Amino acid sequence: MIYRLHQDRTVRAVRESLPQAAADELKLALDGILVDPKAGTQPYGIDDGITRTLVLSRTVVVLLVNDETRMITLLSVTHLG
């Protein structure tokens, strides 16, 4: 079952400001994460099973995975420049 994506206005604004190549890479990665949030991500600090990090060539994303509600919340998106 596919997860839903949630992001607040600030994270959305950061995503919208990304250069096109970074935005395309992130969108493709998120499409995969919505199917399987553990694939392609790694624990953020201590592995609590909820907070994950997605490291790409142009961005780093911190996200929360809620298996009960099938919701992934983007906490931050950092462009690596």
Image: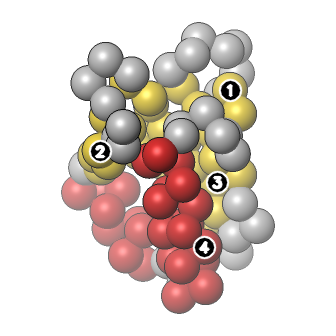
- Say which label, 1 or 2, has the lower sequence index: 2
| CA gap, disc 1 and disc 2 | 20 Å
Secondary structure type for disc 4: helix
Relative side of 50 to 59, left or right: left
| CA gap, disc 4 and disc 1 | 20 Å
The amino acid at mark 2 is: Arg
Secondary structure type for disc 1: strand
Vertical arrangement, residue 23 with respect to residue 66, above or below? below
| CA gap, disc 3 and disc 2 | 20 Å
Vertical arrangement, residue 78 with respect to residue 41, above or below? below
Neighbours of disc 3 within 10 Å: few (<14), some (14-19), many (20+) = some
The amino acid at mark 3 is: Val
In the image, which is nearer the foreground, mark 3 or mark 2?
2
Q: Which residue is mark 4?
A: 25
In the image, which is nearer the foreground, mark 1 or mark 3?
1
Asked if the residue under mark 2 is in contact with the one under mark 3, i.e. CB atoms within 8 Å, the reply is no
Q: Which residue is mark 3?
A: 60
Q: Is residue 38 visible?
A: yes
- Say which label, 1 or 3, has the lower sequence index: 1
In which quarter of the view is residue 40 placed?
top right
Give the percent coordinates (x, y) of residue 57: 76, 67
Q: Which label is found at residue 19?
A: none
